[in-house]
Image: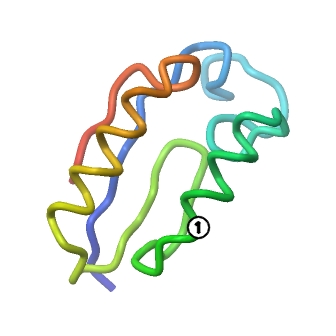
Amino acid sequence: MNGRELRLELRPEWDAAAGGQGRSGLLAADARARTLLRLLVTYPEVCYILPDRIRLEPSSDPRLLESITRFLERQSWLVKSVAVQ
């Protein structure tokens, strides 16, 4: 299945690959991350979410991708940057 993907560059303290412990990024146990995850899964176009990426349906509207990207970029406590692939 092809789809659109948002890849997040996480702040080091949220990135398990950079030495963080346990669940990281969008799947962290932190209350802010859990709230963000609950919001993201409300979009029917979302196929799955990993700590550093969000996969959306291939038919996702480009405006939705832009909207989610801008929203995630404002989460500066977690995200350094977002790339659409």
Q: Which residue is mark 1?
A: 41
State how many labels appear.
1
Which quarter of the figure has residue 83?
A: top left
20 and 47: which is toward the camera: 47
- Counting from the top left corner in percent of width and height, residue 75 is at 49, 27
User: Dot 1: few (<14), some (14–19), or many (≥20) neighbours within 10 Å?
Assistant: some
State the residue at coordinates (47%, 25%).
79
Q: What amino acid is at disc 1?
A: Val
State the residue at coordinates (41%, 27%).
74
Q: Name above or below for residue 15 compared with residue 38.
A: above
Q: Is residue 33 left or right of residue 67?
A: right
State the residue at coordinates (72%, 34%).
32
Viewport quadrant of the N terminus: bottom left
35 and 24: which is toward the camera: 35
Which quarter of the figure has residue 4?
A: bottom left
Q: Name above or below for residue 16 compared with residue 46.
A: above
Q: Name above or below for residue 34 compared with residue 30.
A: below
Which quarter of the figure has residue 31?
A: top right
State the residue at coordinates (34%, 26%).
81
Q: Is residue 8 left or right of residue 11?
A: left
Q: Secondary structure at mark 1?
A: loop
Color theme of the render: rainbow
Residue closest to the far left: 62
- Counting from the top left corner in percent of width and height, residue 8 is at 42, 37
- Counting from the top left corner in percent of width and height, residue 7 is at 37, 44
- Counting from the top left corner in percent of width and height, residue 48 is at 54, 69
Q: Name above or below for residue 48 compared with residue 84.
A: below
